[in-house]
Image (cartoon, rainbow, N blue to C red):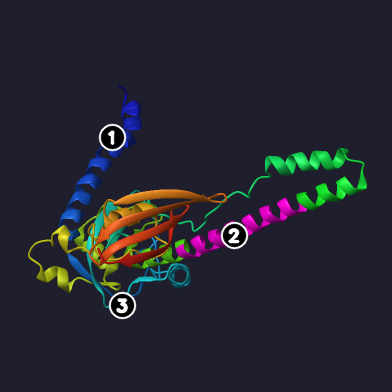
Amino acid sequence: MTISQRLRHLPLLGLAFAAPLHAQSEAALRQAFEGHNVTVKLAMPGTEDGVDIYPLDNPPLDYPRYADRLKDNGTALRYGETVMVTKVKVKSKLIEFQLAGGGYGTMGDETSPTVTVADAPKTTREKNLEGELRRESDPVKKRQLKEELDDLRKERERENARNRAAVAEAQEQKKENIRQRRLEGGSRFNIRYREGVPSSAVSPEAVRQALAAYLDFENMDRESTPLQPANIADAPSPGSGLPRKGMLLADADAQLGTPLKTAQRMEGKLRVVTRVYSGASGRVTAEFVEGVLIKYTVTSD
């Protein structure tokens, strides 16, 4: 191999060593921070977008963008709140420093409040009447056919109105559920480097320095070992507590456990599911429209 050929292979050799080095550095960051408590020095938005910090910029924090995220997503972590570092991850141009879950909106999180249902279709009788009306020439029979057809059309429109009202309620409840879950999902810092994360930035000391203005590490320094996952605010255990309007059916099952009974019916074009659970507060009967909880009742067992 000539000298020029060897030189052409040098960048590839550099890349081959860079990935394991970053992987080793990420492991060191995770060991240093994950499971420890820190105290936030600013309000944190309830979104996986979190707060972007550019250590090499002046100022490091884009305050207008930060304010927009707070306004759009609400405050998940408040100034002075002590929370657990749940994940640290090194990527090509940023280091993710996740707090209390890392923020709502990650894979699997429901972010759209939309609930849809199709309009009620024409019945067979309505279609037949439309055909008969076009063919009928007798004025009296034609008037009778038109009156019956108008009645069927009005009934269909009433059904559509009921469906729209139920969908609107389900959407509002779903929107409120998403808003509440945003406030409970934690947040994160994204330590960003425009030209890629330098190796000098992937160390516990460098991360501390980048976040020193926004996080207090005193609680972490007092802890000899990371806290166990049980100290994280987990979801309610099955069979405890009460559901929340707007929560999804799967979330209700996770909170209340396996239902004692399940039934479903159609309200026009809407699928309504009723589930009965045995909870700590008594028997919970929950009604879901298109998979969204719209109401529930609690009775003694």
Front position in the image: 177 or 125: 125
Would residue 284 appear left or right of 154 to someone viewing this image?
A: left
Say which mark, if any, is on residue 162. Answer: 2
Viewport quadrant of the N terminus: top left
| Residue under label 3 | 79
In the image, farthest residue toward the bottom: 80
Residue 141 in sight here: yes
Which type of secondary structure does the marked residue at label 3 adopt? loop
| Residue under label 1 | 13
Mark 3 to mark 2 CA distance (whole Å): 45 Å
- The answer to whether residue 22 is magenta is no
Residue at the image position 52 percent from the left and 64 percent from the top: 169
Q: Disc 3 or 2, which lies upstream in sequence?
A: 3
Would residue 172 appear left or right of 96 to someone viewing this image?
A: right
Residue 93: % across, % down:
37, 52
Residue range in magenta is 150-173
Q: Dot 2: few (<14), some (14–19), or many (≥20) neighbours within 10 Å?
A: some
Would residue 160 appear left or right of 2 to someone viewing this image?
A: right
In the image, farthest residue toward the top: 1
Callout 1 amino acid = Leu
Front position in the image: 289 or 28: 289
